[in-house]
Amino acid sequence: MLRPRHGMAGRTSGSRRTERARRVAKAIHTMIRVLDEARSVTFYSQAFGLEIADRLDFDGFTLVYMSNEESGFELELTVNKGQETPYDIGNGYGHLAFSVGNLDAEHKRFVERGLNPKDIKDFMRDGALLARFFFVEDPDGYKIEVLQRHGRYQ
């Protein structure tokens, strides 16, 4: 069952809030494997203003957590040491998504930085605009959707 994101669902007494906190999961990061740490960090920094929040180096791999002040959600880049060939993304991966306040300005900025965004698309449903977006690929081929903040895509 879908629950409203705002309104009455957020108004709980102290004990109900504590109970809810114990049973509601909070999304905190997503992980992707990348071949070249520096190239990936540069891409996500230039494209989405993400900065390194933490970097953990281990014997066989490095974890790089990136975020920005817009959200507490983090992108975890996993760099496996000794990996020399690009990863096979396969057909199970979908995409990451970022929302922006001005899609046209962001698209222009991506073009100016040589990030090769696809064309902006209008996605209609029942004659009304559901979403405006474009896609871009990171250096490892991961697809990223950039959406205009609108409706459910805030």
Image (cartoon, rainbow, N blue to C red):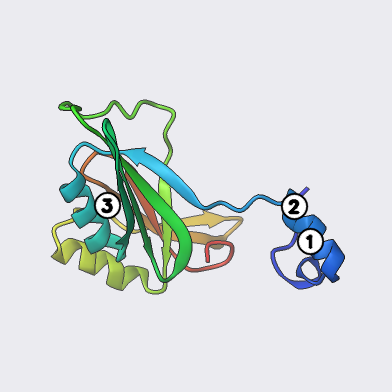
Q: Tags 2 and 1 in contact by the CB under 8 Å rule?
A: yes
Q: Tag 1's secondary structure? A: helix
Neighbours of disc 3 within 10 Å: few (<14), some (14-19), many (20+): some
Q: Is residue 92 left or right of residue 64?
A: right
- What's the mark number on residue 18? 1
Percent position of residue 151, x then y: 57, 66
Q: Do labels 3 and 2 touch, CB within 8 Å?
A: no
Q: Which image quadrant is residue 120 in? A: bottom left
User: What's under tag 2, amino acid-wise?
Assistant: Arg
Q: Secondary structure at mark 2?
A: helix
> Is 84 above or below relative to 126?
above
Residue at 29% across, 37% down: 58
Q: Secondary structure at mark 3?
A: loop
Mark in front: 3 vs 2: 2
Residue 22 marker: 2
Q: Kindly report the distance in space between the C-alpha atoms of the residues bearing marks 1 and 3.
A: 45 Å
Number of labelled discs?
Answer: 3
Distance from the alpha carbon under mark 3 to that under mark 2: 42 Å
Q: Earlier in the sequence, mark 3 or mark 2?
A: 2
Residue 85 falls left or right of residue 65 = left
* Residue 76 coordinates in the image, percent (x, y): 37, 47
One can see residue 108 in this view: yes
Rate crowding at label 1 as few (under 14), some (14 to 19) or many (20 or more) other CA atoms within 10 Å.
few
